[in-house]
Image (cartoon, grey):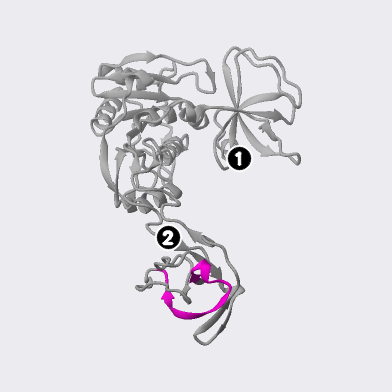
């Protein structure tokens, strides 16, 4: 699947709309931060050689409005946290340690460089603050702003078209037919795409008609970087998705996978772009979206596609039976016990159609093919999914 994709081009993005975007270039500082030595406390800027003494208050340095003169011998300058150090002063005595009477202030002995943040103490001009490939969260946006940049070069957001087909599907909010269910998979996949940095385009749900599905697929890829087709890929009489794509010149790279749930997952390309086929069961589609769709989006964003499917180890809170011939991903709850250990509990019912189980899960337990029975307390591989 990854071999069919390449990182997308970059574009210039304004900082106030860059949340969630991925940097195409490093962000470097345009100047030192702080750009001058500043006080770390409220107090008085003085010359250390003048202390201890009773000094004359000669002015004030406030944040954004520094003292324009020089701190001469026998002088103290009132200073606020974050304000620039006056020329001539080399230390700050905090206000709790002084006694002021009118324009006089009694200060104790104080060493040089006390309570001062030096110029460039955070970073220097030219320093790389964020590397290429970093996703911009709130903290990263703060770093970009501190660099002085109002714009960044970011990888273009992958455009993902999502197509589901089936006479049994009704739109949420409509009155379903007697034998219909509400379409939930396209909304779930679209939400995941958006949360992973893509732009999702839900196409109109097509009925079980090969020509209609082919037209919708062609239209979807004309404006997208990847087409995701949900359902219609099994071997039943009414599974028309793959035959529809064959009309458009589909070349299959993956016909099915040895994964449970999700065996019907497939991947291929047509002349206008790549296509990922996901199972029709919503829970199966969501599992395989985490396993395959997310890495594809990461690859298009120029990031490591393997990092998002890296597992960690956790201890079972109950035994598990032996696994069958397919790798099995169990919807589960990952928690931390009273001793600080990560524990995981698989939900009892793992039917691939159960959305309610997935909504309560925050992890998937990965069982290798033909894994033996596991006792309570055994270590297993777990793929975290985020909050649930």
Question: Which residue is more in the foreground, 247 or 276?
Answer: 276
Report the residue marked by disc 1. Answer: 360
Tell me how far mark 2 sits from mark 1, CA to CA.
52 Å
Q: Considering the numbered disc 2 on the image, is that residue within a helix, a strand or a loop?
A: loop
Question: Which residue is more in the foreground, 12 or 237?
Answer: 12
The quadrant in which the C terminus is found is top right
On the image, which quarter does residue 234 sit in?
Answer: top left
The quadrant in which the N terminus is found is top left
Report the residue marked by disc 2. Answer: 37
Residue at 55%, 39% in the rendered image = 386
Residue 371 visible to an observer of this rendering: yes
Q: Which mark is residue 216?
A: none
Callout 2 crowding tier (Cα within 10 Å): few <14, some 14–19, many ≥20: some
115 left or right of 131 in image: right
Question: Which residue is more in the foreground, 72 or 304?
Answer: 72
Residue at 45%, 56% in the rendered image = 118
Percent position of residue 81, x then y: 49, 67
Percent position of residue 346, x then y: 66, 30
Question: Residue furthest toward the bottom?
Answer: 102
243 left or right of 260 in image: left
Percent position of residue 296, x then y: 39, 27
Q: Considering the numbered disc 1 on the image, is that residue within a helix, a strand or a loop?
A: helix
On the image, which quarter does residue 327 sit in?
Answer: top right
Callout 1 crowding tier (Cα within 10 Å): few <14, some 14–19, many ≥20: some
Part of the protein shown in magenta: 45-63
Percent position of residue 155, x then y: 31, 37
On the image, which quarter does residue 329 sit in?
Answer: top right
Residue 58 falls inside the magenta stretch: yes
Question: In the rendered structure, which disc, 2 or 1, sits on the residue that comes first in sequence?
Answer: 2
């Amino acid at each position: 699947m990854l071999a069919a994709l390449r990182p997308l081009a970059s574009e210039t993005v304004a900082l106030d709309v860059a949340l969630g975007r991925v940097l195409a270039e490093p962000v470097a500082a345009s100047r030192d931060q702080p750009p001058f030595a500043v006080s770390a406390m409220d107090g008085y800027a003085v010359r250390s050689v003048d202390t201890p003494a009773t000094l004359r208050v000669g002015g004030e340095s406030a944040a954004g409005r520094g003292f324009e003169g020089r701190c001469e011998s026998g002088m103290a300058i009132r200073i606020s946290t974050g304000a620039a150090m006056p020329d001539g002063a080399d230390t700050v005595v905090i206000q709790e340690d002084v006694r002021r009477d009118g324009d006089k202030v009694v200060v104790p002995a104080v060493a040089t460089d006390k309570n001062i943040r030096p110029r460039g103490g955070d970073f220097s001009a030219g320093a790389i603050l964020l590397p290429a490939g970093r996703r911009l969260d709130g903290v990263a946006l703060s770093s970009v702003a501190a660099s002085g940049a109002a714009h960044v070069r970011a990888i273009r957001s992958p455009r993902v078209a999502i197509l589901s087909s089936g006479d049994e599907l009704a739109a949420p909010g409509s009155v379903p037919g007697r034998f219909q269910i509400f379409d939930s998979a396209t909304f779930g996949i679209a939400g995941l795409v958006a949360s992973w940095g893509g732009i999702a385009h839900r196409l109109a749900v097509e009925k079980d008609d090969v020509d209609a599905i082919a037209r919708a697929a062609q239209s979807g890829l004309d404006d997208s970087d990847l087409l995701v087709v949900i359902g219609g890929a099994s071997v039943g009489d009414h599974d028309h998705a793959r035959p529809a794509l064959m009309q458009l010149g589909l070349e299959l790279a993956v016909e099915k996978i040895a994964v449970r749930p999700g065996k019907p997952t497939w991947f291929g390309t047509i002349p206008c772009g790549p296509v990922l086929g996901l199972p029709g069961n919503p829970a199966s589609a969501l599992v395989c979206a985490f396993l395959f769709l997310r890495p594809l989006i990461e690859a298009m964003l120029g990031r490591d596609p393997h990092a998002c499917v890296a597992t960690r180890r956790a201890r079972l809170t109950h035994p598990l039976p032996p696994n069958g011939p397919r790798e099995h991903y169990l919807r589960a709850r990952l928690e931390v016990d009273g001793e600080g250990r990560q524990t995981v509990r698989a939900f009892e019912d793992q039917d691939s159609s159960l959305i309610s189980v997935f909504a309560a899960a925050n992890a998937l337990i990965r069982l290798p093919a033909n894994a033996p029975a596991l006792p309570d307390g055994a270590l297993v591989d777990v793929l975290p999914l985020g909050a649930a």
